[in-house]
Image: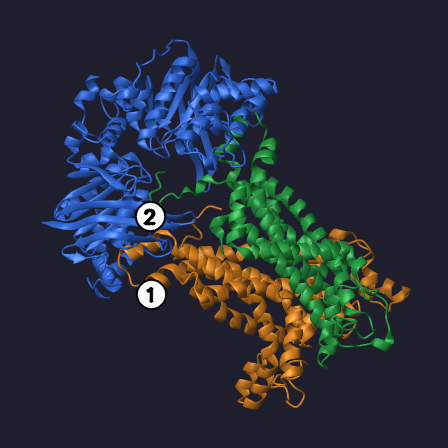
Chain colours: A blue, B green, C orange
């Protein structure tokens, strides 16, 4: 008996360039008590499907065909007032970016009360008690005190709990979770997903989990549908989907999802895999960081962002720097790349202490070219008024003495090196895709032949299939150019694939460091174990690992 | 960020600035109209004095207070001067005052705002205090005070109007520079070997220009109103110079006895100019930032 | 709650450096500019001897810092100098005329808020509708209106052509007696006295100038309300509220409107600034006996003590209004006082 059935749903949006079909004939069934994962990369129409189901499309979007049946009711034809009764009482939603999903100037308890009273689950006199009960249900400690909090006073994970409490306050039978953990730290992610899974099981609800992360869906869902370009390409149980994906696109997604026991080449579709390159290794230290400390003056006393860390990066080596937000990894990379000054400590680069040259003057230092960086947000890291060619040639023009002609040739050589088609060099950042921007960013960073490259979450904003390509490019470049990497990331699977050595940071301190395999397989510190436990665990593919 | 809101990513990312501008003009004829109105104003300002049928200062007692006719399209004033000629000739002075004032505040505001936004610290605090103090006055009243203290001349109107506009530019530039100070592309520019001043001048500031142009356009309208208001209460421009504010002031004395043309025509000219700049500003905003479309 | 009170206290102390700045600027305007201030203060008809007298009286022969201290002490004790034209202390003149200006300004603001805010909300909730288009036309046309010109046109239409408005000559036609002075606001004083005829007479005089001023402030308010409301309606928390099935009224008013109110309140500060400035022009057009027309009359006869007193008074009034706005904001927005600057 299915609770929800969607038949041949079509949704289109009215845009400047005419009508754009976002969903092209999606059909799916959701049984009572089932958790369905809807997986797809950006633009696949997965979220639009759920908004259409709730009849919450933006004003330029409309359902152009198909049927939506919930518990025998035709959702397309019911009156708006009926629909409003259903929302929150029968079907609820949990959103991405929980902080923004809550009214910033209303107490969270009152926001839950609003929903309870709207659906007559509480009266004026019982509302507060019921709201506190709803907060307790999502395992918030000291719910009574939290009732009076405003969203800005709470952490992202806590806000997501509130949003879940709000969604589940009226005991709906169907929960739609739209990227519920995107943007949250990895340990918080796990806690939130487990909370959702437990509550659904406890209450015998059905759920639809929309995510870009196939691994996450595989871990928590009973069944998965994979969407691409507004349609469903494959449907099945997670184990079966990982073991024997039927559709080429699913196979590509499965391959590209980083997981235990795979290697970086295995992320690529089988036909694109080339042999793993030989990576240079040496025991000569390139960068030695000693007792690096950074203390800011905050509003309420000093903030110790980095508390005296020490580590070494050898020539040609790739070192992973792992930690959750606020652990000091960004501060560290900003100091190492000489964009800010440490409070204390030495940065020995080829034996010379870079910390002696203030960051403000480092732009004209002869060693500037030796240390470069690939930035996290590909959009934000390009001057919107410069073409790709201009961006790549900027460091060449400032730091080398190439003639105009040589410079042009060098930029084209770099484009070839990173696999960027030459005609794209004339485009502006907003005319490039995420993957193309990542390539331009890498080309710019390696333009002046640096010895040391800091990669600040270079693939965090990319779809997995693009991430696979970029990670392989980075491995190839390292083999070809012998650059040392400091790879800053929150994703342990990715670090495992790319790094020889890994450093785990927490609260400004290094809690553990060592060879990647040792740290990953026999973690010594409880925090490392916690991080490893929190990473989504897609089923391991026997076939892939063997290859 | 995998942005999976309920709107699909439209293909509009593909087109360039020019196509966007063409799109805005096509879908928004009002902006096109604004550009045409602006052209009319510029023609009147540049060629006006050589086009008008009468000398704007020549009085003729015999023709005093004649209503509009074929010979005098906008009628004549109490001294028999041709109102049409005076309205057209005044364009140059009114535009010159406001453009000079806005240019001055644009320059000073940009420099101060960039410094405050990029380096922050005590300099930022001091500048902030200074702008707070200027903004603590009702702006027109401060302009009155400045002109009264400096002396009653046209230049002083320009200075006064510039002073009260500086905080707007400085605050805008400060905000625009500040949000980009730590942007990836500014950091990348430093890694490429640019010193701070180059990063600020060549990478960050040009990106603040689009919103500034919108502000300039809207401000020009406001500066015209401000200057005309000052001359309306007898500050700055003095009779018999042709200027819209004074002409409305002189005409106001005759409105209660029904000679409407004296005040109405210069008033309409004033409105036309301000309206043009406001429309232009809105249109520029659409071109610069489609999300803010109003 | 204690935190909130502390924030309120902090806001009030924030006004102190601003007031100090205002006093410094007004000192600079009166004393420190090129030219001989004694000549200004003596007025147009002064001779050598009276200028010399003024110079000693004002302490202009002393060094600047000392002059500033004297000036600050004078301001603190309410001594803004003597007006040449009225022969009265400037402070007393201003106090006498202030109620007239306030009555006009506040009526105009009340009028424009009560039209602009509903209009902006309606326009935002029905994008593309007739209300939306009306709002846009009104907004663009409204900011282009020179107040003094609007006033002149209204007089021509309603006084000269239609004859339904009284002559634009002050607060009350001479056939009525001024109501007993209680608040200085004629509408309130007449109502207190129970004198309906005078009340109506005062209202008739007030309608045109208040409308003129209101038309001027309508545009920025409606524009901001519409933009803020549109912004609030497209935010994530509205989507959450809708997905929870809340009624449209609840979504619009409790969720969207309260959030939209915050930027509108901030805009009010700017609107006050414009209104107080435009007030001067409107008072001149309608011969309204407020402090604006007092300053204009003083300008004509080069009565500088009066002009500078007026500038200072207006600035202090504006600082006070801004403080009220800040405090209102603090009370509505829980985030104030926690965020880092």
In the visual, does C176 lie left or right of A528?
Answer: right
Depth order, front residue of C218/C169 = C218
The image shows residue A280 at horizontal and vertical percentages of: 37, 10
Label 1: state its secondary structure: helix
Query: From the viewer's perspective, is the residue at label 1 or at label 2 nearer?
Result: 2
Label 2: state its secondary structure: loop
Q: Is residue C92 visible?
A: no
Disc 1 residue crowd, few under 14, some 14–19, many 20+, Cα 10 Å? few
Residue tagged 1: C249
Q: What chain does mark 1 sit on?
A: C
Residue tagged 2: B6
Residue drawn at point x = 70 percent, y = 65 percent: C309
In the visual, does A314 lie left or right of A272?
Answer: right
The image shows residue C294 at horizontal and vertical percentages of: 71, 72
Which residue occupies the extreme right position in the image? C48
Depth order, front residue of C145/B41 = B41
The verdict on a common chain for dots 1 and 2 is no
Examine the image and state in which quarter residue B78 appears: bottom right
In the visual, does A442 lie left or right of B287?
Answer: left
Q: Is residue C65 visible?
A: yes
Discs 1, 2 touching: Cβ within 8 Å: no
Which residue occupies the extreme front position in the image? B70
Give the answer, above or below, for where A454 lies relative to A37.
above
In the visual, does A422 lie left or right of A181?
Answer: right
The image shows residue B120 at horizontal and vertical percentages of: 56, 40
Give the answer, above or below, for where A71 lies relative to B204.
below
């Amino acid at each position: 008996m299915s609770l929800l059935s969607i038949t041949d749903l079509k949704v289109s949006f009215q845009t400047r360039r005419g009508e754009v079909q976002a969903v092209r004939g999606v059909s799916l069934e959701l049984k009572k008590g089932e958790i369905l994962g809807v997986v797809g990369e950006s633009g696949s129409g997965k979220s639009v499907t759920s908004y259409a189901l709730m009849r919450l499309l933006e004003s330029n979007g409309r359902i152009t065909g198909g049927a939506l049946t919930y518990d025998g009711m035709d959702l397309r034809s019911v009156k708006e007032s009926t629909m409003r009764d259903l929302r929150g009482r029968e079907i609820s939603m949990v959103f991405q970016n929980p902080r923004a999903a809550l009214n910033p100037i209303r107490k969270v308890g009152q926001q839950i009360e609003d929903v309870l009273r709207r659906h007559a689950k509480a009266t004026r006199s019982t509302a507060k008690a019921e709201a506190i009960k709803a907060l307790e249900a999502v395992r918030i400690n000291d719910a009574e005190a939290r009732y009076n909090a405003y969203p800005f006073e709470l952490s992202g994970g806590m806000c997501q709990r509130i949003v879940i409490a709000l969604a589940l306050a009226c005991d709906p039978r169907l929960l739609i979770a739209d990227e519920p953990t995107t943007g949250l730290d990895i340990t918080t992610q796990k806690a939130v997903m487990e909370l959702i899974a437990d509550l659904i099981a406890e209450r015998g609800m059905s759920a639809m989990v929309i995510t870009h992360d196939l691994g996450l869906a595989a871990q928590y869902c009973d069944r998965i549908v994979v969407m691409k370009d507004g349609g469903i390409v494959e449907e099945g149980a997670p184990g079966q989907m990982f073991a024997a994906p039927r559709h080429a696109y699913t196979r590509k997604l499965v391959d590209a999802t980083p997981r235990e026991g795979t290697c970086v080449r295995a992320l690529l579709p089988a036909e694109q895999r080339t042999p793993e390159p030989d990576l240079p290794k040496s025991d000569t230290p390139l960068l030695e960081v000693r007792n690096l400390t950074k203390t800011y003056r905050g509003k309420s006393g000093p903030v110790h962002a980095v508390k005296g860390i020490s580590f070494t990066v050898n020539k040609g080596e790739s070192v992973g720097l792992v930690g959750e937000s606020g652990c000091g990894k960004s501060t560290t990379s900003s100091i190492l790349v000489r964009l800010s000054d440490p409070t204390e400590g030495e940065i020995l680069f080829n034996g010379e202490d870079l910390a002696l040259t203030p960051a403000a003057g480092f732009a004209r230092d002869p060693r500037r070219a030796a240390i470069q960086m690939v930035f996290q947000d590909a959009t934000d890291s390009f001057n919107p008024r410069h073409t790709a060619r201009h961006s790549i040639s900027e460091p060449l023009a400032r730091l080398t003495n190439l003639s105009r002609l040589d410079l042009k040739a060098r930029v084209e050589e770099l484009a070839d090196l990173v696999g960027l088609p030459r005609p794209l060099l004339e485009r502006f950042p907003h005319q490039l895709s995420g993957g193309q921007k990542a390539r331009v960013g890498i080309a710019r960073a390696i333009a002046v032949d640096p010895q040391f490259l800091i990669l600040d979450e270079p693939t965090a904003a990319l779809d997995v299939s693009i991430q696979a390509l970029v990670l392989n490019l980075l491995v190839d470049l390292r083999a070809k150019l012998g650059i040392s990497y400091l790879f800053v990331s929150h994703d342990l699977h990715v670090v495992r694939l790319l790094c020889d050595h890994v450093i785990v940071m927490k609260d400004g301190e290094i809690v553990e460091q060592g060879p990647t395999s040792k740290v990953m397989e026999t973690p010594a510190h409880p925090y490392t174990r916690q991080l490893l436990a929190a990473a989504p665990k897609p089923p391991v593919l026997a076939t892939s690992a063997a290859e | 960020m995998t942005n999976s809101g309920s709107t699909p990513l439209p293909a509009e990312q593909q087109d360039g600035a020019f196509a966007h501008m063409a799109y805005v003009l096509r879908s928004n004829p009002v902006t096109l109209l604004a550009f045409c109105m602006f052209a009319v104003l510029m023609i009147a300002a540049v060629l006006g004095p050589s086009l008008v049928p009468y000398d704007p200062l020549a009085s003729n007692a015999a023709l005093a207070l004649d209503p509009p006719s074929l010979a005098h399209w906008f009628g004549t004033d109490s001294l028999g001067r041709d109102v049409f000629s005076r309205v057209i000739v005044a364009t140059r002075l009114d535009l010159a005052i406001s453009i000079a004032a806005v240019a001055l505040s644009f320059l000073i505001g940009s420099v101060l705002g960039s410094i405050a936004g990029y380096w922050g610290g005590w300099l930022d605090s001091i500048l902030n205090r200074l702008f707070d103090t200027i903004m603590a006055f009702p702006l027109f009243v401060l302009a009155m005070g400045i002109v009264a203290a400096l002396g009653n001349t046209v230049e002083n109107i320009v200075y006064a109007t510039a002073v009260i506009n500086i905080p707007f530019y400085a605050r805008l530039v400060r905000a625009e520079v500040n949000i980009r100070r730590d942007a990836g592309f500014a950091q990348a520019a430093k890694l490429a070997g640019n010193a701070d001043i180059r990063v600020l001048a060549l990478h960050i500031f040009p990106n603040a220009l689009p919103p500034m142009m919108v502000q300039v356009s809207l401000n020009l309208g406001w500066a015209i109103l401000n200057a005309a208001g000052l001359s309306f209460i007898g500050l700055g421009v003095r009779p018999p110079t042709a200027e819209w504010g004074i002409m409305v002031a002189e005409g106001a004395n005759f409105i209660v006895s029904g000679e409407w043309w004296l005040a109405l025509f210069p008033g309409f000219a004033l409105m036309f100019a301000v309206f043009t700049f406001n429309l232009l500003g809105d249109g520029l905003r659409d071109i610069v930032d489609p999300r803010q479309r109003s | 709650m204690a935190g909130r009170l502390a924030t309120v206290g902090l806001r009030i102390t924030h006004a102190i450096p601003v007031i100090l700045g205002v006093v410094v600027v007004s000192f600079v305007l009166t004393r420190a500019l090129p030219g001989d201030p004694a000549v200004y203060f003596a007025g147009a008809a002064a001779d050598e001897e009276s200028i010399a007298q003024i110079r000693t009286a004002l302490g202009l022969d002393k060094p600047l810092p000392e002059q500033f201290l004297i000036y600050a002490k004078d301001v603190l004790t309410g001594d803004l100098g003597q007006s040449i034209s009225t022969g009265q202390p400037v402070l007393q003149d201003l106090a006498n005329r202030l109620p007239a200006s306030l009555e006009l300004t506040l009526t105009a603001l009340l009028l424009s808020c009560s039209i602009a805010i509903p209009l902006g909300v309606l326009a935002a909730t029905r994008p593309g509708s007739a209300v939306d288009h009306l709002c846009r036309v009104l907004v663009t046309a409204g900011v282009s209106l020179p107040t003094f010109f609007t006033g002149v046109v209204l007089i021509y239409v309603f006084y000269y052509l239609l004859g339904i408005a009284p002559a634009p000559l002050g607060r009350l036609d001479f056939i009525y007696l001024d109501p007993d002075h209680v608040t200085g606001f004629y509408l309130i004083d007449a109502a207190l006295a129970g004198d309906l005829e005078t009340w109506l007479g005062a209202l008739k005089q007030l309608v045109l100038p208040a409308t003129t001023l209101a038309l001027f402030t309508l545009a920025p308010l409606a524009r901001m309300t519409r933009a803020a409301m549109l912004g609030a309606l497209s935010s994530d928390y509205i989507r959450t509220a809708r997905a929870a099935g809340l009624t449209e009224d609840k979504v619009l008013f409790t969720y969207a409107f309260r959030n939209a109110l915050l930027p509108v309140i901030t805009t009010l500060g700017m609107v006050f600034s414009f209104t107080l400035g435009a007030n001067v022009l409107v008072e001149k057009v309608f011969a309204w006996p407020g402090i604006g027309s007092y300053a204009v009359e003083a300008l004509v006869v080069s009565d500088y003590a009066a002009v500078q007193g007026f500038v200072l008074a207006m600035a202090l009034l504006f600082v006070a209004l801004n403080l009220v706005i800040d405090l209102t904001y603090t009370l509505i927005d829980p985030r104030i006082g926690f965020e880092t600057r």
